[in-house]
Every structure is written in C-alpha cells, then in structure tokens.
Image (cartoon, rainbow, N blue to C red):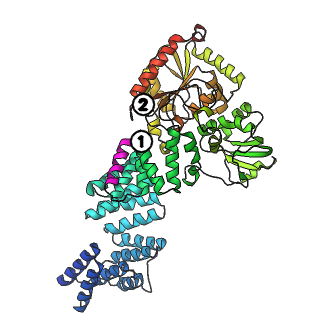
Amino acid sequence: MRFWKFGKTATSAPAEPAPAPATTARVLAIEESIDRQDLPHARLLLDQARAAGLEAPELTLVEAQLCRLEGDTTTALRLCDDLLTTAPDPGRVQYEIAECLLARSDLPGALESLDVAVALSPGLGAAWFKLGETLMRLDRFTEALEPLERADQLARTDKLKILTRYRQGQCLLALDQVQPARLAFEATLALAPDHLEARIHLGHCHLRLDDEPAALACYEQAVARQADPGHILRLNLGSAYQNCGRYAEARALFEQLQRQRPNDHQVRWYLCQLDLLEGRWAAGWAHYRARFAAGASRFRPMPYRLWDGRTIPDQTLLVLADQGLGDEIMYASCFDDLRRRAGRVIIECEPRLLALFQRSFPDLTFLATERENSPAWLAGLPAPDWQIPSGDLPGLFRLADDDFPDRPAYLQADPQQVAAWRQRLSDTLGPGLKVGISWRGGTERTRSRARSLAPEQWAPILQVPGVQFVNLQYGDYHADLARLRALGHAPIHDFPDAIADYDQTAALVGALDLVVTVCTAIVHLGGALGRPVWILTPHAPGWRYTAHARSMAWYPSSRLFRQPAWGEWTPACQELTVALAQLTKNVSPALAAM
C-alpha cells in the first residue's frame, strides 16, 4: 500500500493541542458554507480567518477542500502534502487527497489513498463511502459492498446515510441482487422521499421482480416530480403501462417520444414491440431492426450485402441465427418462403435444432454454430452473396394477418422416434390423455416471474381425471417436480432422456395428445410441430402472444388462456381446467385406451 506524497512520508502525527475555540468556529462556518455550495462565502470566511492570523491544520484542510471544489486541485494537493506530517488526523488528509485525485479522474490513485484513509481513520464514514463508490466506478461491485456497509454503520448524518443507501442499492442491482437492492432504495426513500433517482431505481427493481403495478407507481411518481422528465424515464413509464396492459397510455407516450426523437433507437424499439403486440404487423416490422441498436439483440456484421427480399435465383443467401431458441423456431416458419426467392439458402441455427431443421427442410443447408462473428464457419460452402438475420424474415413475409399460413405444421419430428415414444407412453403410463406440462419460462431478464406459475397453482389442473401428465420443463426442475408430486394428485411422469436431447423432446411432444405450458420455448416447438398447445398467458404478455387473440398467429393449433388482470392466474387455470375436463370426455375410445 502506497501513500500519496510529494516528498514526505505520511505517518501518524505527534499529538498536538486541540484547536482554539475561535479556530473551530471558523472551520465550522466555512464547512457550512461549503455544504450549502456557497463557495464565494466560504472563501470570504477563509480569507478573514487567515487575516486574523489563524494557521491551524484544520483550517488548512478545509482550505484544501475549498480549493478542490473551486477546481484548483494542484493547490489542494500541495496543502495536503504540507499536512501529512502535521495534521492530528492524517486519515482525513488522505481522504481529501483521494477527492482531489477523483476530481482528476485518477481512480487507481484515489483508491490507494482511500485504503490509507480508512486504515488510519477507521471511524471516518465518508472515507468508507468514497471507497465503496470508487470501487463501483471501477466495476468492482462485490468488493464495494463491505465499505458501503461500514459507511452506513458509521454515518452520523442523514445526508451520508442517504448517499450510502442509494449507492448500496445501485451496487446490489448491478450484482443482480434485486430484492436486497429494493430494500436499499426503500431505505433511501424513507429518509429522502424526494430522491428522484432512488424512486426510479426502485421502479427498476419492481420491474425486475415482475411487480408491474408497483413499478408503474414509482415511475408515475417520478414523472410527476419533474417539470421536464427525460425520455428514458418516460420510456420506463411507457413500458410499465404496457406491462400492466394499459396499451393506449403506453402508445400515447411512445408516439409522443417518437415525434420528439424520431431517430432514437430505444424509442423505435419500444414502439415496435407494442405494434407487434397489437397485431400491427407492418408497422412493427418496419422498426424491428432497431433491436440491434437498442441492445436487445446482437448484430454480427458479415462481409455480405443485407438482403431486402428481392428474388435471387442464381445467388446464395445466408440466414443468421437471431435471439433465443423459441425465436429461432418461430422464424423458421418463414423458411418455406425463402425457397421461392433464393437459389441457395444457408441457415445458421442453434446446435439443438440442427437435426430437427434438417429433417423439416431437406433442400436447405443448415449449420450449427455458437454464433461467431467471423464467417470462418462457412468454409467449404459457396460464398454467400447476401445475408439476413432470421428475425428480419417476418418483416418480408408476415405483414398482415392473412400472410400467416393456415397449416398444421412446418417442423417434423423423427417419425420412428414419435412412434417409439407413443409406445413407451402407452406401456409406461397406461390409458388416458397424455398431456405434457411446463410451468416455468424465461429468466429474470425476460420477466420469468410474470410468465411462470408456482407448482401449487397447478393443483386444479392436476386434479382432472383421465389425464397422464408428462414433464416438459427444462433446466433445474427437480425441486419443483417434487412439489408438484407432493400435491397428491396425478403423478408427473419424467423422462430425463427426452429433456436432455432436443430432437427427443420434439419426438416426445409429437407423441403427446396435448401440451399445456406457460410462455416458453416449448410453445414454439409444439406449435411448429402442429400439436395442440394450450398456453397460460400473462395479462400483458410478450409481443409474440399478441394482446387479445385466442390463438397465436404463428401456430393455428395454439390456444391462449389469458389472465384477466395482472397477476391473477386463478381464472386462467380454472378456464383451462374446465376445457381439459371437457376434452377428456370427448376423447375417442381408442385414444383413451392407449
């Protein structure tokens, strides 16, 4: 650990007499003026103190602080250097040195001085706070938590407590510790109800925790507290309106922002998602490429022209994989359209989908990759003339409701494996309707809580007689499966080999009579295979599920069971339960015996 020095070594200073009362009063008066940000008055008081012959180290330290705030860090550092061997509290001097270095954007140097400051003056809360804040600026969020906690414990003023708790919230949010971050922002607002940034960040936490009404309340309060709220805050408010199903208010806000900022990619991205959600296909696809500039999807530049949909019978088109697994399946609904426009088509895909895509589109060329930026993975194939991300295909082929083909399926599972699974299900499960279920979808970043159901919420569905339920949940599902089985209703049959291999997952889905699922990739797999898919759908779902339709435009075999209001799964589950019970009554005798 190095100490800041111009030529002196910082050591503990010898004991000095306490400053005279007159000096202490002058220092406090200057500090009060600085706190009020009245620097001219602070300078006047300092000059008067010097004119009165006062030369105490405490006065020199406050002079260094004033010089720094006036922009003269050179003088401030010189004054601190003079104090290193004379000040009664060298930790405070090191803290001021750190502040000067931060003003010069020297974060590593400031960090060294702050380490020294807290070592020499462990009770100095401001130094602990600044240490945590500096570590955050260096993206060292985990390390920042401890000094911020020390600062909160040592804070003697509400001002420092407010600063510390707000920074704690930011740090925790950066570490994806959303629930503790929420508590930190609430603690900030308890001391400072008008802290605008804390209220906005609290809204972000509620949004990440899928508590859309609470997020909306925070954003509305933040907007109401500003004469001219910025466009980012208004975008957050519009997004919260949309996620609460208040589409008209979201549209009014997004369209106002678009008029004010016509070239803003974030604004275009938010508005295009609302357009697609409401089935305004042409308008939505027109701005769908904004997802790249808005950071919602990663654009990988390749040395080929961007295809605009023109007919290229003697040329090669490269289709790049785009977004998630379910999206790749959904965009594959446009692959048949490519056959009529391009002479040769090379399609990049997720490795899990390779066998399924190759079987379903045997005249197209598929390559499984890890989405590398370099085109080296194309070696040995004809050089592409054109490229297009698969997410751009609907913008060429799905501009109106009538453009969505009314076909039973466009993907084909291995027929032999489907037959094998039908036999295995019959032998293992016995008679009854074979229904696959998936109860959890997405990640925290993709509104997992809003899309998922707790195992206990499946109870009425699992009570329907004459049904054999089969697990289709991916990921770490074993704890949830145990909870489902503990409900004491129908058993949930699990076939891990089908979950581990996606081509086997497709064959299993092809062998089932019905899939019941939340909004997740299994929706797209079942729909693309033409299997009946019943979808428990949030009140305000992602745009792929549209706002009001009873089925997905992409999949005629789908049926949506929607929440009537935010967070209310019971009515949707009851509606599905009734429909499932009716289906078991209408099932053919041959099917019931399988």
Q: Is residue 564 above or below residue 373?
A: above
Question: What amino acid is at disc 1?
Answer: Ala
Do we see residue 284 in this rendering?
yes
177 or 185, nearer to the observer:
185
Q: Is residue 455 above or below residue 120?
A: above
Question: What amino acid is at disc 2?
Answer: Gln
Choose top left, top right, bottom left or bottom right for residue 147: bottom left
Q: Position of residue 439 (x, y in %)?
A: 49, 31
Quadrant of the rendering where the C terminus is positioned: top right
Residue farthest along the top direction in this orientation: 589
Q: Earlier in the sequence, mark 2 or mark 1?
A: 1
Left or right? Give the position of 319 relative to 113.
right
Name the main secondary structure of what is drawn in magenta: helix
Q: Position of residue 495 (x, y in %)?
A: 59, 26
Disc 1: which residue: 248
Instruction: Please give the label number shown on residue 355.
Output: none
The verdict on residue 208 being magenta is: no
Dot 2, how many residues are within 10 Å of its Cα: few (below 14), some (14-19), or many (20+)?
Answer: some
Residue at the (47%, 61%) spot, across then down: 140
Q: Secondary structure at mark 2?
A: loop
Per the rendered image, the range of residues in magenta is 211-225
Q: Position of residue 545 (x, y in %)?
A: 52, 34
Instruction: Please give the label number shown on residue 563.
Output: 2
The verdict on residue 224 being magenta is: yes
Q: Is residue 63 above or below residue 332?
A: below
Residue at the (59%, 49%) spot, across then down: 289
Dot 1, how many residues are within 10 Å of its Cα: few (below 14), some (14-19), or many (20+)?
Answer: few
Left or right? Give the position of 183 relative to 265.
left
Left or right? Give the position of 477 relative to 81.
right
Choose top left, top right, bottom left or bottom right for residue 189: bottom left
Q: CA distance from mark 2 to mark 1?
A: 19 Å
- Viewer-side label of 2, 1: 1
